[in-house]
Amino acid sequence: MDICVIGAGYVGLTTSAVLAEFGHNIYCVDNHSEKIQRLQNGIVPIYEPQLNEILHKHKERVTFTTSLPESIHQSSVIFVTVGTPSLADGGTDLSFLSSVFTTLAEQLQDYKTIIIKSTIPLGTNKKMHDYLLEKGVSPSFFNIVSNPEFLREGTAIQDMFYPDRTVIGIAEDDNRSEVILKEIYQSINAPFIVTSWNSAELIKYAANAFLATKISFINEMSRICDVYDADIMEVSNGLGTDQRIGPLFLQAGIGYGGSCFPKDLQALQHSATNKLVNTPILDAVQAINATQLDFYINKLQETLPSFPNKKVTVLGIAFKPHTDDIRHSPAIALIHYLHALGADVHAYDPKAFLPAELRHKVTQHKTIKSAYLDSEAIIIATEWPEICQLDWMDVKTHLKGNIVLDGRNCINKEAVRKAGLIYKGVGRG
Ligand SMILES: NC(=O)C1=CN([C@@H]2O[C@H](COP(=O)(O)OP(=O)(O)OC[C@H]3O[C@@H](n4cnc5c(N)ncnc54)[C@H](O)[C@@H]3O)[C@@H](O)[C@H]2O)C=CC1
Ligand SMILES: O=C(O)[C@H]1O[C@H](OP(=O)(O)OP(=O)(O)OC[C@H]2O[C@@H](n3ccc(=O)[nH]c3=O)[C@H](O)[C@@H]2O)[C@H](O)[C@@H](O)[C@@H]1O
């Protein structure tokens, strides 16, 4: 099939790579000309495991372009994967989506299946459908399908090859799209869940909200562990082996971040509030996340009461391992916090870079060793394997102080203590 993918970001590039692997011809469009130029030169602008290799393997099948009208005409199927960031009031900025639909309204001349993968608030698929009709596009020229994406950054390619389910939301009178979507995804072996537009939209938000709830729940338990000398790792293990609960997303830490959980919880709350529905669970989940770092900083202050001019090392900048994405990264919030306390902050990440506003305040190192050399304290913010596997006996010989704060509960506390260092985790008693 000839497929147009609009938006060459984390979701758009992954979609392009995976659909190309399935044998489709892809026109991957972005209005960011520099990004497209780099992609045309074989440079993938983000770090996502396997993405580079698959795009390179299928370079004959994937065309990178800034020309949306041309790509629309060349394709029978159009995937929309543009960003849907938060507005100041918690609502969703739909300007990127609207701009795509403006072009679609101008260009649609024969039948296309328009598949929206971007996460969009309840009622938006219908709104886009009504917009095209208002603009005079014939209803015989298109169907709109809501096809929410559940991939995680860091494992995006594997998640798209092997999803737990494929959700498609279609209009009541749409009897073409299910067949077309099944053809596009025929290589995927996962249940197909066909719903209305609004249900598909809510499934996406509910999934992210539920996962964030698990994280805030376990973080709340970690606070109780701290004051009763229990160990959250033991609690998570004992809790997660109950099949009704499950072991995933019960990792206590400095809170969830990323481009989606914070934005999607706010957007869901915004949609509910617009219809006068209260959301006490979503309120609590976000409140716990917003204060998790404070609890953690308090721990650091118990051991290192004064920060000014003390070298403190933050290991990890990305919001999670195996990505270079720093959007809403708890590591960045932590670095801001430490800098505000007067610490001389040094940071290291194998793939991610400090944002511009921190570059003149904080030193980012190229090697992990130079980052912690002569440091008073190490704080682990992202559980990259190379950080989890540090040799603590060796680390000890290069530190000035003796404090290790494990913000992701990812290192062996016994090994740290054996090396003569003070270990503090999240909810480790
Ligand atoms: N990042 C993730 O892990 C996931 C994201 N999502 C959702 O997918 C959507 C996209 O997310 P990301 O890929 O992370 O965003 P992103 O910000 O990495 O990429 C979006 C791309 O769209 C491009 N764009 C914006 N307006 C355009 C236009 N008019 N024409 C062509 N290109 C345009 C931007 O230049 C950018 O390259 C969001 O709604 C997000 O919530 C869903 C599941 C996972
Ligand atoms: O809508 C989205 O964009 C995506 O959001 C999340 O994926 P992602 O943000 O890439 O990463 P996660 O693995 O979910 O981690 C999110 C945050 O939660 C934190 N986390 C995760 C798991 C856990 O047990 N504890 C915990 O603190 C991570 O460190 C990270 O900061 C969802 O897991 C995806 O299903 C969804 O498609």
Image: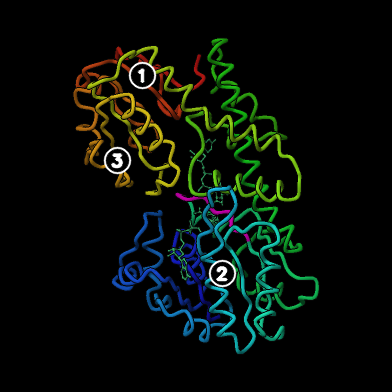
* Residue 382 seen by the camera: no
- Circle nearer the N terminus (2, 3): 2
Inter-mark Cα distance, 2 to 3: 33 Å
Inter-mark Cα distance, 1 to 2: 54 Å
Magenta range: 148-154
Is the Cβ of the residue at disc 2 closer than 8 Å to that at disc 3?
Answer: no
Mark 1 burial class by Cα count in 10 Å: few <14, some 14-19, many 20+: some
**Front-lying residue, 394 or 343:** 343
The residue beneath circle 2 is 98
Q: What element carries label 1?
A: helix
Dividing the picture into quadrants, the one containing residue 308 is top left
Q: What element carries label 3?
A: helix
Image side of residue 153 versus residue 134, left or right = left
- Residue type indicated by callout 3: Leu
Image side of residue 379 versus residue 244, left or right = left
**Front-lying residue, 330 or 383:** 330
- Residue type indicated by callout 2: Ser
Is the Cβ of the residue at disc 1 closer than 8 Å to that at disc 2?
Answer: no
Q: Is residue 254 above or below residue 96?
A: above
Dividing the picture into quadrants, the one containing residue 376 is top left
- Point out residue 102 in the picture as x, y percentages from the top left corner: 56, 76
* Residue 94 seen by the camera: yes
- Point out residue 246 in the picture as x, y percentages from the top left corner: 65, 35
The residue beneath circle 1 is 415
Which residue ends up furthest to the right in the rendered image?
A: 172
Is the Cβ of the residue at disc 1 closer than 8 Å to that at disc 3?
Answer: no
- Circle nearer the N terminus (1, 3): 3
- Residue type indicated by callout 1: Ala
**Front-lying residue, 329 or 158:** 329
